[in-house]
Amino acid sequence: MTATTEPFTPSADLARPTVADAVVGHEASPLFIRKPNPDDGWGIYELVKSCPPLDVNSAYAYLLLATQFRNSCALATNEEGEVVGFVSGYVKSNAPDTYFLWQVAVGEKARGTGLARRLVEAVMSRPEMAEVHHLETTITPDNQASWGLFRRLADRWQAPLNSREYFSTDQLGGEHDPENLVRIGPFQTDRI
């Protein structure tokens, strides 16, 4: 068995326009969007911890996302290389036309810049997403920021948005608000 490896780029070098997938924000304080790598796991963990009401997973889980699921995740850093935004998700194995978005986190320094939308669209516009025409996620009923983001995405993509209860409070152990399944689509990925 032959192992193949992708070239490794140190984190300090990733906060450069020549390596980033996209540069957003103001010229004075640009943000760089790219795929995550193993050096980003702890930064992602710290970012999510600073973004309540998001559920915080283990640092190990974020390392797995940054490596095993890097093609379906996006990360934003500032010029210093600090992680200021992250989106994670995957293409569903039982529905390959559907991307399930797991988490979106935008740190305080990057709020109000439209970064959450740009992160989602960075993932959705990748060549490996060409066959994806639906986006799903779960949102608690009171998370107005997430509801606003997904309504804006549906409007921008000119696609319907539907939702229904997915996980009840009882299913989540009685200590978590219910989660609604939100579905946007169909949409044309090549128009994002």
Image: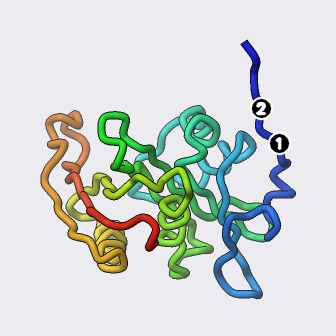
Q: Please state, as top left, top right, bottom left or bottom right, where the N terminus lies in the image.
A: top right
Query: Could you say where residue 98 lies in the image, as x and y percent from the top left?
Result: 34, 49
Give amino acid for label 1.
Answer: Phe
Q: Alpha-carbon neighbours of circle 2 within 10 Å: few (<14), some, or many (≥20)?
A: few
What is the x, y in percent for residue 171?
18, 34
To which residue does mark 1 refer? 8
Would residue 68 be found to the left or right of residue 43 on screen? left
Residue at 36 percent of width and 79 percent of height: 156
Question: On screen, 83 above or below 23?
Answer: above
Residue at x-position 66% and y-position 49%:
36
Amino acid carrying mark 2 in the image: Thr
Q: Is residue 165 left or right of residue 44?
A: left
Whole-angstrom CA distance, mark 2 to mark 1, is 8 Å
| Label disc, if present, on residue 5 of the rendered structure | 2
Does dot 2 land on a helix, a strand or a loop? Answer: loop
Residue toward you, 130 or 101: 130
Q: Which mark is residue 32?
A: none
Residues at marks 2 and 1 touching, judged by CB atoms closer than 8 Å: yes
Choose between 16 and 124: the one closer to the eye.
Answer: 124
Secondary structure type for disc 1: loop
User: Extreme bottom residue here?
Assistant: 27
